[in-house]
Amino acid sequence: MTHFLDIHKTTPADLRSILDQANSMKSARAGRPKGTPDDEAPLAGHMVALIFEKPSTRTRVSFDMGVRQMGGQTMVLSGKEMQLGHGETIADTARVLSRYVDMIMIRTFDETILLELAEYADIPVINGLTDRSHPCQIMADVMTYEEHRGPIKGKKVVWSGDGNNVCASFLHAAGQFGFDLTFTGPLQLDPEDEFIGLARKGGVRVEIERDAAKAVNGADLVVTDTWISMHDEQSASQRRHNMLRPYQVNEALMAHAKPDALFMHCLPAHRDEEASSEVMDGPHSVIFDEAENRLHAQKAIMRHCLGV
Ligand code: CP
Ligand code: NVA
């Protein structure tokens, strides 16, 4: 069974072929109305369940459109409205859905929910974000970087802010794609040691630098994300804002990066909190290309999982 659970759980060769396919599928339909089907219909006859236990705009719309463009069908389900949200076990849910549909994409809270679903399903399961990682996003981000600047291998990526789920997938990708990653943020919000170790085992440099300006020095790519994720205690918001304010990505901070550095944010953003509007709308920013590339990268991920 080929699941897509995390970037470090897929081989570098498979990750590269997913991105190659994403690029060729993107160029093959350039300029067409979005609702028109691709020339090929690799998902014809396939039904994909898209389960959301948290809100979503990009993941929901890009997966749904991607399946439709490839000739398949989708069923968008809210966790709360399923028996899953009322005590049915994950294992039973996995076994039941495997009798009805051909693939599951799930956005959920605890990673164990995703892992248990994958363990008991007879069909591929794709991680559409958990509290701990967001692999589809970073596949789109690597695709976006390379589209603008060529190979990401050997480049310096700086993550500024909260060492959250999106940051975790950047660490997974660092080891697999061969780029260095510097984390800058408060000690309390460091990424998990396990993920730092994984990246280092992949032979790349991972550094932690509390001074944001020093961290960004010489960066090829600067990335940030919301200061409060969907799984975070919302009541801790003031404390987190105070801790994270020195790590806002603004023009003064970007001035320390290489002149042709890119700026990324997975969105949704809280403008003028984690990143200034000037940076988000400025010449370094590729945030809407990232959002678009979710569609293309995920189409290739789905083909990889289904082997079609
Ligand atoms: N970046 C991302 O996953 O966005 P959504 O929460 O809108 O899906
Ligand atoms: N870190 C954010 C990402 C949203 C796409 C969250 O988990 O809420």
Image (cartoon, rainbow, N blue to C red):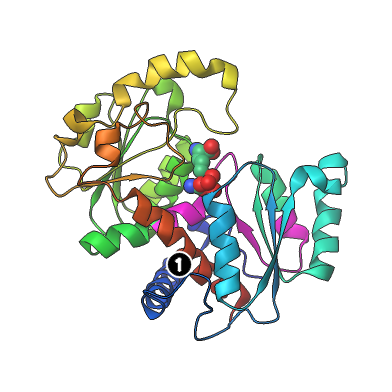
| Label 1 residue near ligand 1, CB within 8 Å | no
Drawn side of residue 223 relative to residue 166, left or right: left
| Residue 127 drawn in magenta | yes
Q: Residue at x 14, y 35 (%)?
A: 255
**Which amino acid, by three-letter code, is at mark 1?**
His
Quarter of the image containing the C terminus?
bottom right
Looking at the picture, does residue 16 appear above or below residue 247?
A: below
Looking at the picture, does residue 295 appear above or below residue 229?
A: below
In the rendering, at what x and y percent does residue 108 appear?
66, 44
| Residue 171 drawn in magenta | no
Snapshot quadrant of residue 49: bottom right
> Badge 1 local density, few (<14 within 10 Å), some, or many (20+)?
many
Drawn side of residue 243 relative to residue 51, left or right: left
Mark 1, residue position: 296
Magenta residues (range)? 117-140
Q: Residue at x 57, y 83 (%)?
A: 41
Of all residues, the one furthest to the front in this rendering is 33
Looking at the image, can residue 29 be seen?
yes
In the rendering, at what x and y percent does residue 153 appear?
26, 59
Q: Residue at x 70, y 58 (%)?
A: 118
Looking at the picture, does residue 121 appear above or below residue 160?
A: below
